[in-house]
Amino acid sequence: AISIEKIFSNTSFKMQVRNYTKSFAQNIFPKEKRDMKSKTVFYCKNCGNEFPRWQGQCPACGAWNSIEEFVQKPASAAKGKSAAPGGSASVRTLREVDTEQELRFSTGLGELDRVLGGGGVRGSLVLVGGAPGIGKSTLLLQICAYLGKSQRILYVSGEESERQIKMRADRLDVESENLLLLSETDVTTIVETVREVAPDILIADSIQTLYNPESTSTPGSVSQVKDCTMALMQLAKGSGVTVFVVGHVNKEGAIAGPKVLEHMVDCVLYFEGEQSSNYRILRAAKNRFGSTNEIGVFEMEEHGLIEVPNPSEMLLAGRPIGAPGTCVACAMEGSRPVMAEVQALVARTSFNVPRRTTDGFDFNRANLLLAVAEKRGGLSIGMCDAYINVIGGLQLDEPAADLALVLAVASSYRDKPIDAKTTAIGEVGLTGEIRSVTALQQRLSEAARLGFTRCLIPRHGTQQITAPSGMELIRVRNIREAIEFSL
Ligand code: TYD
Ligand code: MG
């Protein structure tokens, strides 16, 4: 007879027991079944962060009531659909991937091509975001006129009927045999239609109106918007259709809900502008195929959007002449120099703590420059309110605009105007020194083209810079010299 302990200490018996338990567990919870379990996660509509449970306030961005439930599809159910982008799971070397067929195409609008990084890319998904009424539908309908000459376009609208699109197209002078219209919000129907008519380009207006009937949440909710974008993305990568999607931006400035979309799509463009002005700026927040520094400038006219190839003129239009508190800066927007007016209003404060606000300029950078101007420029602005504004909706986040800001502040403080034909380019350091900037020669040519006759530039590192004809260069070492010269 064998004692019971002996049986348990026998290794082969142990193995048998282990294998048995393992297969038992696998029978009860087969792998597919385990994968089939759908998972619930919670997303913040505002910032897109993910949480395991619902909360009243988002711990990441602090927004109230912005967290929404999202049921993730079971892994195995999603697997069939979401293989590698392009459909195949086979491996290829870099050299084998062919780029024979032309990948880029022009949209017919040079400013849009510039922001896209040199034209649209076949099989990419571009999200065009912006506030309602800014002109997203107009922009996308307008490019159909040119694209329709050589490509088939399917324009799907969930916001307007075919008749309304036709009316708008007539007003924009868009006429093409190749432009197909569909008024539809069901994303599965859209996918089917695309497979049927095989367009080269799909325009979907807007992502918030689309819905997937398989998902139970309401159109415009995070899960719907994610689902629909995923479906369109698979369409783009799988069949090579180029997709343009419109997304409305909410009050906070994030594309409503689909802040969560930014990581999915290839390119995110924001269309911005003030309701009061006709000018619109298109900028890329993300671009897998190009730089995100470029901007495109348009003007909204009666018959649609007109390109503005020289934005400096527009930004300087209506500039006050002979008024204190303004100076013109020259910033590089991508590869293009753009002149913009920086305004400052400096006045004795009536509060305990001086007020400072900036529009179009980084707040902390402006505060730093105000401190430098006080300490190194000899302006006692410590107890003054300072309001900084960049005209034209441009965001000057480049150090080259520092000097113009300091001069605008000094001009306002001393109540003396800076000569209207003088501009200033340079970065300001903490000791008040003026440092050299990139692409100075290019900036100077732009300033000369716009009729500026004098330009303050850094003294260091600018020996080889030559003045464009008709322009005098003033090389300054620090902000004190710059202020003394220009005021
Ligand atoms: P729209 O493209 O409908 O905005 P979005 O799709 O971004 O919501 O643009 C609507 C605005 O543009 C509206 O205020 C009127 C103006 N507009 C013009 O000034 N001229 C035009 O030719 C068109 C079509 C629109
Ligand atoms: Mg619209």
Image (tube, helix red, strand yellow):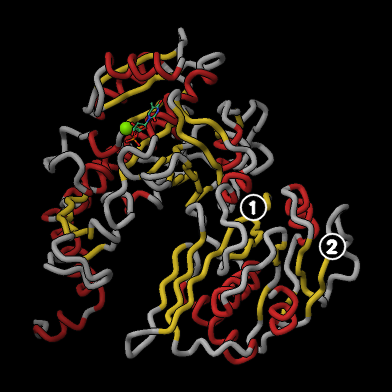
* Mark 2 beta carbon near ligand 1 (under 8 Å): no
Q: How many marks?
A: 2
Please state the horizontal and vertical placement of residue 272, each as a whole percent of the image.
42, 47
Ligand 1 quadrant in view: top left
The quarter of the displayed image where residue 122 is located: top right
- Residue carrying label 2: 472
Q: Is residue 282 left or right of residue 193?
A: right
Q: Identify the amino acid type marked 1.
A: Val
Please state the horizontal and vertical placement of residue 189, each as a whole percent of the image.
25, 23
Task: Choose between 350 and 119: the one closer to the eye.
Answer: 350
Residue positioned 28% across, 18% down in the render? 164
- Tell me the SS state at disc 2: strand
- Tell me the SS state at disc 1: strand
Q: Identify the amino acid type marked 2.
A: Glu
Q: Is residue 147 left or right of residue 7?
A: right
Query: What number is the disc on residue 389?
Result: none
Task: Choose between 160 and 403: the one closer to the eye.
Answer: 403
The quarter of the displayed image where residue 160 is located: top left
Please state the horizontal and vertical placement of residue 52, each as a whole percent of the image.
18, 66
| Circle nearer the viewer, 2 or 1 | 2
Residue positioned 63% across, 73% down in the render? 407
Taking 38 as reference, is 479 above or below it? below
* Mark 1 beta carbon near ligand 1 (under 8 Å): no
- Residue carrying label 1: 338
Q: Quadrant of the C terminus?
A: bottom right
Alpha carbon separation for disc pair 2 and 1:
20 Å
Taking 434 as reference, is 183 above or below it? above
